Image: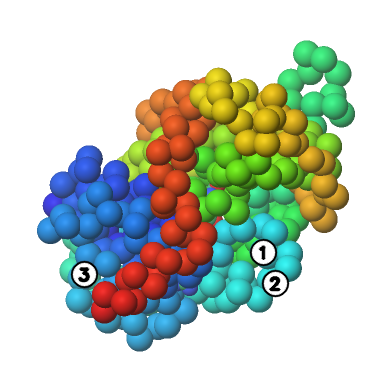
Amino acid sequence: MKTIVVTGGAGFIGSAVIRFLINETPHKVINLDKLTYAGNLQSLKSIDNSERYTFVQADICERAHIDALLNTHKPDIIMHLAAESHVDRSIDGPGEFIKTNIVGTYTLLEAAKDYWNTLPEAQKSSFRFHHISTDEVYGDLPHPDEYKANEKLPLFTEQTAYAPSSPYSASKASSDHLVRAWQRTYGLPVVITNCSNNYGPFHFPEKLIPLVILNALEGKSLPIYGDGSQIRDWLYVEDHARALFKVATQGKVGQTYNIGGHNEKTNLEVVTTICKELDKLISEKPQGLKSFADLITFVKDRPGHDRRYAIDASKMANELHWQPQETFESGISKTINWYLDNQAWCENVQDGSYKRERLGAL
Ligand code: NAD
């Protein structure tokens, strides 16, 4: 049994990773999370009574807290997901992104390096620092409308040069560079993953897919940036969690692995697919609507908006034998049904009431 520290474990992907680790593996998990607006312990209710699970509220920028946690729990693996993750927020206020994503990763790397240096040789060589990053560090790819029909479109590979466009992706790119440098310079055994857009249960309702589902249910407009032609490569979050575990336990030190869902969709396709599914599931629509698609509204595009992301995940398939199990159709159907069944979770995370409940209980 290994001990795995997961930073950002109360977030969307981190909570899926922890549910996977507790339900599908024998390992112990320490969830290190600051509980920002995006962190929510209700996403972990199904596993939080496991003896193999511990929650520690801490900030990755606070070195003393990280040192105490590492020296107490003596992890074999650190899976680092804690981050500010919403591009729109990074445009309105980049400061928190620089602090958490860059300074926080630096602080965690320094603490991990000093802890790692105290380990006996065998544990030292099996230790892993797994940094979880995004495909957005690569910037954007040519869009199909710039290519002739049947021409092969390029994909992001592990060799693609970094060209981030937003304060979010620039801060993640910076943190990737720091992680690589700590391996080259100090020998810290790191692995890095760059993943495409995730979707699935427990996704904070500011992101496209949950926002569209919840707005539709309330009869609110469904805002789409620009003309909706931006392409993302959608990956179901539980497929991502499985991939991350493979990399953390079987990935080669110093290597990067790109993880994607083989599901390129324009934002407009995503929104119309959700509307069609909801049309089938809900006969009594708000405000007497005929179709949820009537709520689609095109709004001014996001500045610096990347037009296309798409991942070549062949290294994951060939070296670690990982493939996504969900198609977009099966994953989106599961996701929509989850949001229909869990509206209390959505209300709680949106109005912060779960945090008041938690504080009241302390
Ligand atoms: P999220 O915003 O849902 O969760 C982030 C978590 O980090 C929250 O629980 C928050 O409380 C915690 N956190 C934030 N600042 C912290 C700090 N200073 N100290 C400790 N904890 C802190 O994010 P997510 O969507 O789950 O993404 C997780 C990681 O995966 C991020 O690093 C992100 O860049 C990366 N990623 C996300 C996607 C995606 O589609 N969501 C795709 C590729 C990569």
Q: Residue at x 34, y 57 (%)?
A: 42
Place residue 213 in its image quadrant: top right
Q: Residue at x 47, y 52 (%)?
A: 346
In front of the other: label 3 or label 2?
Answer: 2
Residue at which label 1 appears: 89
Place residue 32 in its image quadrant: bottom left
Label 1 crowd bin: few (<14), some (14–19), many (20+), radius 10 Å: some
Residue at which label 3 appears: 74
Disc 3 from disc 2: Cα separation: 35 Å
- Image check: 159 left or right of 236? right
Q: Amino acid at mark 2?
A: Gly
How far from the left and from the top, in percent, is residue 28? 19, 57
Mark 3 secondary-structure assignment = loop
Callout 1: CB less than 8 Å from ligand 1: no
Question: Is 90 placed above or below 308 here?
Answer: below
Label located before the other in sequence (3 or 2): 3
Mark 2 secondary-structure assignment = loop
Label 3 crowd bin: few (<14), some (14–19), many (20+), radius 10 Å: some
Place residue 103 in its image quadrant: bottom right
Mark 1 secondary-structure assignment = helix
Q: Amino acid at mark 3?
A: Lys
Disc 3 from disc 1: Cα separation: 35 Å
Q: Amino acid at mark 1?
A: Arg
How far from the left and from the top, in percent, is residue 186? 43, 70
Callout 2: CB less than 8 Å from ligand 1: no
- Image check: 257 left or right of 221? left
Question: Is 246 placed above or below 102 here?
Answer: above
Q: Residue at x 49, y 48 (%)?
A: 203
* The C terminus, quarter of image: bottom left
Callout 3: CB less than 8 Å from ligand 1: no
User: Which mark identifies residue 93?
Assistant: 2
